[in-house]
Image (cartoon, rainbow, N blue to C red):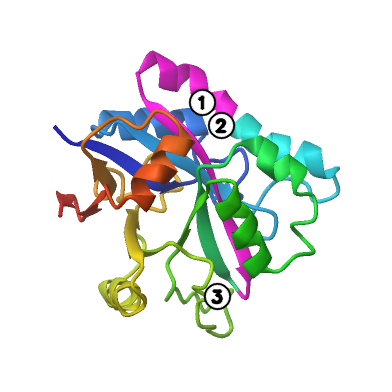
Amino acid sequence: MLYKYETHMHSSECSKCAKSSAADMVRAFHEAGYAGAVLTNHFIWGNTSVPQELPWEERMQLYYDAWLSAKPVAEELDFDLLFGIEHLYSHWREILIYGLPVEFWKENKDVPEIGVEELGERIHAAGGFISHAHPYRMRPRYMPEFHDPILTMCDAVEVFNFSEPDESNQRALALADENGLLKTSGADAHSVFAEGIGRSGMAFNRRLRTGTEFAAALRAGEGRLIIKGEIQ
């Protein structure tokens, strides 16, 4: 038996672009037959609704509160809800970060000042896992120019993002192969009506109850890509 996990999911509590609550997103993925999902709301420089003027620890707590708000529903449904973030590191480029508790983010108050390379070193030292999200995304409405992704801190590339066209995903797949990186798939779902629900993510041979287990399983290459609803 394979257990399906969504790797890229937003909620209205912290992502301005999301339309559904974390609890409702849990219900939607559970109904689609998933064992779990990672809540990856937009972080400090992304399309976040977390007030920038709040003290650092309060801001980090709000990201965690979004996750906590859905935990009762997840527990009731026996659904593995995991905590992650989507970090915009520069020029509209973003990375998905898995396997770290909120305490890591509260302790690293200098994230706005350090470069992505140093951040990557800290994430890996703490046992986290990094996948580069949609490396060839172009949105002319808010992205006036394209910048090549930085991969030196990445463990993987999101080679299938349901919200991206096939050409973009094919280029991401080639990028992962060229650099010998692992591969992830995600819906990039922002509402319970997202078409990607049930059609992307990763499948594993076992349940992954914690973020630490999820990151370790990705690092070990245990996950199988789910692409357009098919487990590869």
Q: Is residue 47 in sight in this rendering? A: no
Question: Of the residues tagged 1 and 3, which is closer to the observer?
Answer: 1
| Residue named by callout 3 | 141
Q: Quadrant of the N terminus?
A: top left
Give the percent coordinates (x, y) of residue 167: 28, 78
Q: Is residue 220 left or right of residue 104?
A: left
Residue 67 is marked as 2
| Residue named by callout 1 | 70
Name the residue rendered at 63%, 69% in the picture: 117
Residue 105 is marked as none
Q: Who is closer to the viewer here, 202 or 144?
A: 202
Q: Who is closer to the viewer here, 100 or 229?
A: 100
Q: Earlier in the sequence, mark 1 or mark 3?
A: 1
The amino acid type, in three-letter code, at marker 3 is Arg
Q: Who is closer to the viewer here, 152 or 30?
A: 152
The amino acid type, in three-letter code, at marker 1 is Ala
Q: Is residue 29 left or right of residue 91?
A: left
Which quadrant of the view contains residue 191? top left
Q: Let me know if residue 108 is in the magenta part.
A: no
Give the percent coordinates (x, y) of residue 158: 37, 62
Q: Let me know if residue 82 is in the magenta part.
A: yes
Q: Hey, which residue is sitting farthest front in the picture?
A: 125
